[in-house]
Image: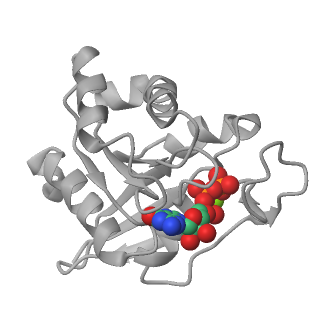
Amino acid sequence: MTKNHHKIIFSGPVGAGKTTAIHSISDTAPVKTDTRASDMAKNKKSHTTVAMDYGVLNLDDGEQIHLYGTPGQERFDFMWDILTEGAIGLVLLIDNSDENPISTLQFFLNAFKKFIAEKSVVIGITKMDSRNTPTLEDYRKKLKESSLTLPIFEVDAREKKDISLLLQTLLFTLDPNINEA
Ligand SMILES: Nc1nc2c(ncn2[C@@H]2O[C@H](COP(=O)(O)OP(=O)(O)OP(=O)(O)O)[C@@H](O)[C@H]2O)c(=O)[nH]1
Ligand SMILES: [Mg+2]
């Protein structure tokens, strides 16, 4: 049987949980390129991704989903385009405890505008346990103002079931013929 290999990207700001999410869901030991975050202006956490994360998810039908995580830092944004090449969908993770997470979401939607217009995106809001505002409703309202209706969920990147829900939604919203590609 020929296996299909699909590629999905995780992006979003520093500390949103991209590396954690790929670690939670990957069936193989994920590859990380985290280094000490001594030079980070925000210094939100001890380690940060400098190139990419990589993991693999095996589906029941033998297909594989290759998961790539981007660095969150804007100074590595050249990696965003490189990693997005050939991908079928994007998972955007947004840290709700950031200062202005709605504008962060808008920034990332804009950065991946072309990709989103051609492919598919799902949004996961993390750390709602740390800060419960803005609410999902606030996000939806903002998206509606830009005439966007995108799937958006509250997730914890440490929870496999939450990341699985994001991926299932993304695969579901993709072209139903994708399995026959
Ligand atoms: N409280 C809480 N912590 C979370 C949640 N999701 C992720 N985390 C934690 O937040 C941190 C996220 O760190 P990373 O996964 O390295 O973040 P990243 O998006 O890869 O960041 P960069 O690589 O620096 O861009 C980890 O310590 C996670 O355990 C959540 O929903 N709630
Ligand atoms: Mg990371």
Q: Pinpoint residue 153: horizontal percent, then vertical percent.
A: 27, 52
Give the total number of marks visible in the rendering.
0
Ligand 2 resides in the quarter of the picture at bottom right
Q: Pinpoint residue 106: horizontal percent, then vertical percent.
A: 44, 26
Q: Which of 153 and 27 is in front in this view?
A: 153
**Residue at 24% from the left image edge and 52% from the top image edge:** 170
Q: Can residue 102 be seen in this view?
A: yes
Q: Is residue 129 found left or right of 166 in the rendered image? A: right
Q: In which quarter of the image is residue 74?
A: top right
Q: Is residue 38 found left or right of 77 in the rendered image? A: right
In this view, 46 is above or below 71: below
Q: Is residue 38 found left or right of 130 in the rendered image? A: right
**Residue at 41% from the left image edge and 23% from the top image edge:** 114
For the N terminus, which image quadrant? bottom left
**Residue at 83% from the left image edge and 58% from the top image edge:** 37
Q: Which of 17 and 117 is in front in this view?
A: 17
